[in-house]
Image (spheres, helix red, strand yellow):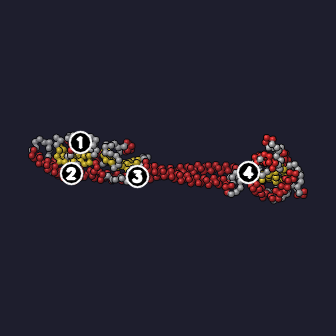
Amino acid sequence: MKNAVEYEIYQTVKQVRNHILRIHIAVLFATAVLIFACTVFYCNKISAKKESELCTALNTQTEQNVSAFLKKLEDTSKLIFSNDKYVSYNAADTSNDEYDSIGVENDMTDYFVSLSVMGNYTDFGMVYSNNHTVGKITDGTRDLYSDKIYDAVKEKLDGEKTLWLTGYNGDYTRIYFARRVNPDAIFLSSFFSTEFDSIFFSTANYSDISVMLCADDKIIYSSGSESPGSKIDKDISDLIAGDSNVTVINAKTICVADDCADGWQIITKTDMSDKIGSYKRTGVMCFAITCAMCIIHLLISFAVVARKNPENISASGRLNKLDGATGLYTAEYTENAIMDKIETCITGSTIALVIVRITNLDLIKLNYGEEAVGEAQRKVSEIIGSVFKNEDIYGLLEEGEFIVFADFTNYDLFKAHDDMKKSLRSLCAMLGECGLDKDRGYIRAAVGASVYPDCSNDYDELLECAEKAAAQSADNDGKYEIYAKEKDHSKA
């Protein structure tokens, strides 16, 4: 079926609108994705900044606490130098008087024990080149160094005056401080690493943060789950890359490292995986909310498009524009279109309002059923579409009855009427040969017409005149009739 020119124009407009709608969908989806990405990126950036500041503060405070704690032991060890007798005493000297040595060593032991109580130190005493000890040297230390404390500590000192050391034979639970007193004597003090419990900032409320005291890629103490003596995680080691006093941030980890005593480091790290996961979930929520808003927006847009769609205008409560069985305009739409056309007609127009009525529709329905009625209407509608121009308006007035508003305007009035009659003759000829499929019988039709403005310039009057002409056509074996006022109706 040929469509009216208005419908073709609207089809073009609809295609453009649908194209814009598809672009709109793509833009909305891209916006949702962008919101998701920006949410995750912004949250991660803000959180990384805050976590970095927190880690830096924790690391700095811990470094200061550890340094102060270690310095206290260093300062305490200096007190032994206030007594020249203790400093100069050499237990390895075989020329010492035995009784004098016992007296000096007893005095030294009492003094060292009193000093050790000040800091809850495990060891606090002298070791000499003959591995003799004076003061408070525990059995644990003797067993650890196999009674060769001096030799082992001297090797570690390697000419230095003082040294912090741990990890001998894999034992990182004891922290030792050594100080050279004289060529044959080394002061040695120690404490258990658990003493750091009161020094390190509690991270109980920060399960993803760990503060560690490290030496030579080994952990001496950790506020987290890492055990003393375990190796620093390779990712952390690679992240720091041997640097100190640095803050390093990567996709999942924030790490801060500061120097401490004798090359030791305080390292604070936080795992951002859970937070990133949380931000992703937040991003997904934002994405979902945006998508929901987009879907609502699109549904509204589709509803608006559907409302304006020629094939489906019922969304706004208006009637459908096209008849589903024939593809022609509905009666309501056709009547409105014809009345609009009449209002815009120019002077000198010649337009025919044609009624085509299937006269044997009841017989077709009785013999072949409703499907045959639909078939008859489709065949007649195809013939109407083939006879008249695209610009003409035609539709289904009621079951078995069609209406056409065909424009034959020509500056030559006689030619205009000749063209109209020629089209009506062609229509009648084609209808006369029209039949149902499978040779089930012919379709009989009557054709009546009224002419605008000859008969009237009012739609209702034109329709009434065309109906009268169609009734006369039915009585004349389907030959077309054109209504004439002077004869009430006449055959042309």
Q: Earlier in the sequence, mark 2 or mark 4?
A: 2
Q: Earlier in the sequence, mark 2 or mark 3?
A: 3
Q: CA distance from mark 2 to mark 3?
A: 39 Å
User: Disc 4 vs disc 1: Cβ atoms closer than 8 Å?
Assistant: no
Give the residue at mark 4: 323
Q: Residues within 10 Å of mark 2 (few under 14, many from 20)?
A: many
Q: Earlier in the sequence, mark 4 or mark 1?
A: 1
Determine which of the numbered discs, if any, sits on residue 144 in the image: 1
Q: Residues within 10 Å of mark 1 (few under 14, many from 20)?
A: some
Residue 93 point in image, percent of width and height:
13, 42
Q: CA distance from mark 2 to mark 4?
A: 105 Å
Give the residue at mark 2: 116
Q: CA distance from mark 4 to mark 1?
A: 101 Å
* Residue at the (11%, 41%) spot, across then down: 94
Q: CA distance from mark 1 to mark 3?
A: 41 Å
Q: Residue furthest front?
A: 366
